Amino acid sequence: MDAASTSTLAANVMHFARLLRRAGLPVGPAETIAAQNALTLIDLASRIEAKTALRTAMIHRHEHQEVFDQAFALFWRDPSAAEQAAAMALLEAQKEKKLERPPPASRRLAEAFAPKTERKRPPEDEPPVQDAVLTVSDQERLQSMDFEAMSADEIAAAKREIRRLVLPLDLRATRRLRPDAHGPITDLRRTIRTSMRNGGEILTIARLRRQTRPPPLVVLCDISGSMSRYAQVLLHFLHAVTNQRDRVHSFLFGTRLSNVTRQLRARDPEVAFQMVAHAVPDWSGGTRIGEALAGFNQLWSRRVLGQGAIVLLITDGLDRDGAHGLADNMDRLHRSCRRLIWLNPLLRWSGFEPKSQGIRAMLPHVDEFRPVHNLESLRGLIDLLSRPNTPTRTQS
């Protein structure tokens, strides 16, 4: 390859990296240089090898592969694609096409391809709105927007809002005691030991008070294909909560259960999510909720569910195993914690009905059943967890 071709290829890789950044992917100079070096080690005549080399060098998380694949297909166009598209257009011209909502990745790439100077203008025949009361600010619109319908810029803004959320939990008394001059408990042992220094005369009475700590927070988050879009945003919430307080335990499950508590303790979000991507092999796969809960009850329940732990179960309840063993494992999990809160993005629909076997098996064993699909639902969850509450076992 001559110098001119090399410089042209390097420039194209640089522009491709900029496209991925505009689409919301964390692609920096290191990934760009690695991609350029990777292309020098393969046969550029093979489109599959080029795509594999670029994806290996520039993508570090499973949920970014869909955006990368569509960006690669649009940026590195096949020369024969135009002829094929023209032929397909002649065949489809006679058919009525149903308008469908494009997937989130397509919308993000369309915004990334659009020029920066392009802005939507209102129709000239429509008069401008003068009533300021009817207008809604972007901030308010962002609070109620579904995570799945957000663009790349809106997702970035939502992630910044999530990092500002604070999760205070009501303090609970533990078995440990600490010295306190005004405590309600008399410490006879320390009182007598202190009196020995004064010839056995008791001059002061030592007192104790029970320590108070927030209860442990355990999060079980579904990362299957139907939940991947929400899990991508909720991971930022878990990362923020993990770094704000102690005794937070995070687990991800799809076809297997993965403990990602240690990975999420990294202060840098990108470092934490890159570690999570390497630790979780089943991102955007199937869902075995019953098997995942069985593994949690057997391996982790005694370790993390203590001192009034609160469990957040984030899943849509769609189990590929037909709810096999799900009711028994949900019942055991329910009896092992103080509060079990189920967060389901399907509740965003007003006509939601528990028709699937998994949802019907899980509902009788939860204390709270709430939606989680936008920033408002997260704020409502924080308000719920911040209120002192004596759990009541409700049956649905």
Image (tube, grey):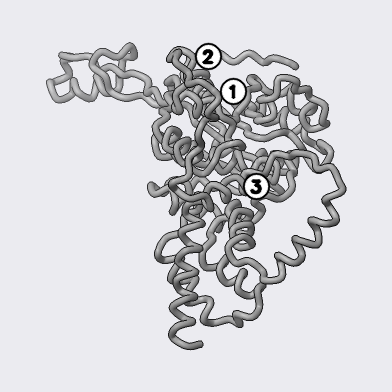
Q: What residue is shown at x 63% (from left), y 25% (from top)?
A: 371
Circle nearer the N terminus (3, 2): 3
- Badge 1 vs badge 2, beta-carbon distance below 8 Å: yes
Amino acid type, callout 2: Asn
Amino acid type, callout 3: Leu
Identify the residue position indicated by label 2 in the image: 389
Q: Is residue 304 above or below residue 174?
A: below
Residue 271 visible in the picture:
yes
Instruction: Give the SS element for disc 2.
Output: loop
Identify the residue position indicated by label 3 in the image: 257
Kindly give the residue lying farthest to the bottom in the view shown. Answer: 2
Circle nearer the N terminus (1, 2): 1
Nearest to the observer: residue 123 or residue 215: 123
Amino acid type, callout 1: Arg
Image location (x, y in percent) of residue 142? 50, 29
Q: What residue is shown at x 37% (from left), y 23% (from top)?
A: 211
Identify the residue position indicated by label 1 in the image: 339
Circle nearer the N terminus (1, 3): 3
Q: What residue is shown at x 52% (from left), y 49% (from top)?
A: 114
Q: Is residue 107 above or below residue 39?
A: above
Kindly give the residue lying farthest to the left in the view shown. Answer: 198
Q: Is residue 217 above or below residue 223?
A: above
Image location (x, y in percent) of residue 157? 45, 37
